[in-house]
Amino acid sequence: MIRLIAIAALTFVAACGADDPPFRPTGNVGVSVGPNGVTPSVGVGATNGTFNVGLSL
């Protein structure tokens, strides 16, 4: 019974994409100068090549 559960769990993990590449952190920093003065910008995120997730401030 335990072997059956272990095989089912291994199959589930392999089918859900657990073997995909790990997410790599990304980031950027910028400064813009315009008529309203200096405006900083910052962004952080993560990517695995297919999906991108990020937050910009």
Image (spheres, rainbow, N blue to C red):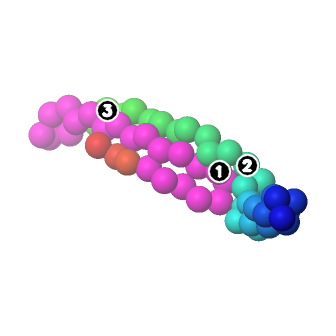
Q: What's the CA distance linking mark 3 and mark 2?
A: 32 Å
Residue marked by disc 2: 21
Stretch in magenta = 33-54
Q: Residue furthest left?
A: 36
Which amino acid lies under the numbered mark 1 shown in the image of this protein?
Answer: Asn
Which of discs 3 and 2 lies nearer the camera? The answer is 2
Where residue 48 is drawn, which disc sits there? 1
Examine the structure image and report whether residue 9 is included in the region drawn in magenta: no
Q: Are marks 1 and 3 in contact (CB under 8 Å)?
A: no
Which amino acid lies under the numbered mark 3 shown in the image of this protein?
Answer: Val
Residue marked by disc 3: 31
Left or right, 43 with respect to 51, comes to left
Q: In x, y percent, where is residue 4?
A: 85, 66
Which amino acid lies under the numbered mark 2 shown in the image of this protein?
Answer: Pro
Does residue 55 lie above or below 29 as drawn? below
Q: Residues within 10 Å of mark 2 (few under 14, many from 20)?
A: few
Badge 1 or badge 2: first in the primary sequence? 2
Q: Are marks 1 and 2 in contact (CB under 8 Å)?
A: yes
